[in-house]
Amino acid sequence: MVTGERERLADVVAAALQVAADTGAAGRCTAEVRQTLAAVVGEVGARVTDDAELRGFSAGWQEAMALRPAEPRPAPKEHAGLPGHAGADGRVFPGGGQQAAAVPGPGARPRVS
């Protein structure tokens, strides 16, 4: 959180504590008053946190967009390094079109002739 949000939350907490102290001194600080004050502080804290997270995401997104290249790179036309496909230099990697031998699954017995 930046200083503004910290100050905002600190002001709300200070006000809630002042209300708690005043109602306590007057003998009127009930469980309902305490729950209400805690809810107010919790709600303001959640809003402050949400605002800070959104601001941080927006700043990060803007930074990422500023760093991306102006012109998009062309997509690769071929899958380099995959068997049977041509690489960037035009050579074909071995293994294209070949099937691996079937392996028996668990519990399967190999056939004996």
Image (spheres, rainbow, N blue to C red):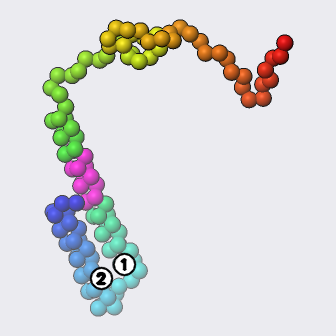
* Residue assigned mark 2: 20
Q: In the image, what residue occupies the spot 59% across and 12% down? A: 99
Q: Is residue 3 above or below residue 86?
A: below
Expressed as whole percent of the image width and height from the top left, the position of residue 43 reads 31, 63
Q: In the image, what residue occupies the spot 17% across and 28% down? A: 69
Q: Which picture quadrant has residue 29?
A: bottom left
Please rate how many residues cluster around mark 1, counting C-alpha atoms within 10 Å: few if below 14, some from 14 to 19, many from 20: some
Q: Is residue 103 above or below residue 64?
A: above
| Mark-to-mark CA distance, 2 and 1 | 7 Å
Expressed as whole percent of the image width and height from the top left, the position of residue 66 reads 15, 35
Check if residue 53 falls in the magenta segment: yes
The disc label shown at residue 34, or none: 1
Region rendered in magenta: 47-58
Q: In the image, what residue occupies the spot 31% across and 16% down? A: 76
Q: Earlier in the sequence, mark 2 or mark 1?
A: 2
Q: Which picture quadrant has residue 77?
A: top left
Position of the N terminus, as image quadrant, is bottom left
Q: Nearer the viewer, residue 62 or 27?
A: 62
Element carrying mark 1 = helix
Check if residue 29 falls in the magenta segment: no
Inspect the image, locate mark 1, and give the three-letter code of the amino acid beneath it.
Arg
Q: Nearer the viewer, residue 39 or 112?
A: 112
Inspect the image, locate mark 2, and give the three-letter code of the amino acid beneath it.
Ala
**Most frequent secondary structure within the magenta stretch:** helix
Q: Nearer the viewer, residue 111 or 64?
A: 111
Q: Which picture quadrant has residue 2?
A: bottom left
